[in-house]
Image: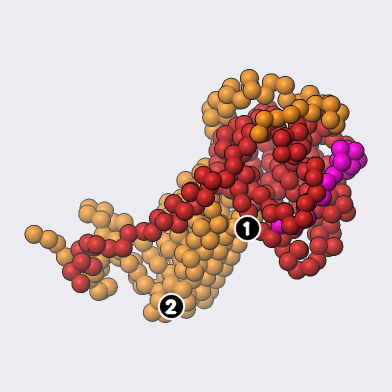
Chain colours: A orange, B red
Amino acid sequence: MWKRDEAVKPAGPAGSGPAATPTPSPAASQPVESVRPTSTSSASSEPLRGMEKSTVNIGKSVVIKGELNGSEDLTIEGQVDGKIELRQNVLTIGPNGKIKAQVFAKSVVILGEVTGNVTATEKVDIRDNGSVDGDITAPRVAIAEGAHFRGSIDMQRTGAAKAEHKAESKPAAASAGQPATAGAGAAAAAR
Amino acid sequence: MLSDILKWGGKRPDRSGGAATSAATRDEPVVVSKGLPKFLYALTQQPSPLLLDFGPVIGTNVEHFGERLGCKLFIEDLLAEIDRHTRAGTADQLSAALEKRFRHGDGTVDGILAWDVFDFLDKNAAFTLAKQIVRMLKPGGIVMGFFCSVPSEGAPFTKYEIVDDTSLRHRHHAGIGGSKRVLQNRDIIRMFDGLNVSESFLLKSNTREMLLRRK
């Protein structure tokens, strides 16, 4: 009638999920220099029927210095100094995560602190209490109330949308750009 | 527990905070802006405008300028800077801080949203900031600023959220606020030496909305 949820099984060697200790992929040009795996570093997989979707967690006490590459979704609650590349996957910086790194990912969700530039091919989402000091490049950027951000945002917009907006705003603002002296153009505006 | 295994009856994400925020947002006044449509129009005339925002980051503004207008947006939250100096009792150092703050080269910026930041600056800091604005703006570049006509003590900071092309929601800002000082039109013209006052609107609130353009 019901099936046992695979997620509650104790992690075992036969599991299809990733290893408990976060390790860089062999492709990483610079190995992880210091990793302090502890019991808080854990692997968890969300078995979806017929899909090999998994998320790796890097726990609060883990400190990684160097380059972090991968092809799985990743949640970081610890500290990473260096570079993070998950070009095809979602990176989540948890509320306890502290990142001083260049970040490249498909999508980045930030609930913790990031110092460094963030580049995403899909979306950057800074949630409430998330903090970014650096430049963001992504086609979509969402910033929640209460988030901190200092830096630049480049959304690489398509030309079509801009043309559409130009057409919309032209009649309303046709008189813009005609210089006048101070006070000469003063007008009472309805509030 | 069985319910844990089956994930029945689990705690749902708390959405009450979001509801409270949106309720508060609804209570904040939406004010028609005469300067905003002209500012937006001026930006659309540039291929990939580079825009500086002196207010705190607001998601909807980022969406508007980044996604709709294709701006490269730089957030330079000067209210946070003013707040920090006010709390630390170092307001006299604000002018020096503003002089060093901006990383943009001469004549590289297409637009600047100064909002009402100048109201909270003393004369030295206001002149320093104006000088930086004139330095950074491209020829034809545009600044939008709001200037009060009545001084006030302990005025709260306001953050300005774009509702649509013609209106702004004046939202509460958590900062400490400060005294609002009046800059006369002649002060503004002198401060922004190198810019023309392109448009000036006096609102019923006695706020002057001004657009200034680099000659």
Q: Amino acid at mark 2?
A: Pro
- Please tell me which residue lies in front, B119 or B206: B206
Using the rendered view, name the quadrant where residue A10 is placed.
bottom left
Residue at position x 31%, y 56% from top? Answer: A53
**Residue extent of the magenta highlight:** B177-192
Whether residue A80 is visible: no
Q: Which residue is mark 2?
A: A37
Q: Quadrant of the N terminus of chain A?
A: bottom left
Q: Between label 2 and label 1, give the one nearer the viewer.
A: 1
Residue at position x 83%, y 46% from top? Answer: B182
Residue at position x 76%, y 33% from top? Answer: B202
Q: Quadrant of the C terminus of chain A?
A: top right
Q: Position of residue B101 (x, y in %)?
A: 77, 56
**Label 2 to label 1, Cα distance in Å?**
40 Å
Q: Is residue A148 left or right of residue B20?
A: right
Q: Position of residue B35 (x, y in %)?
A: 70, 32
Q: Is residue B9 left or right of residue A102?
A: left
Q: Amino acid at mark 1?
A: Ala
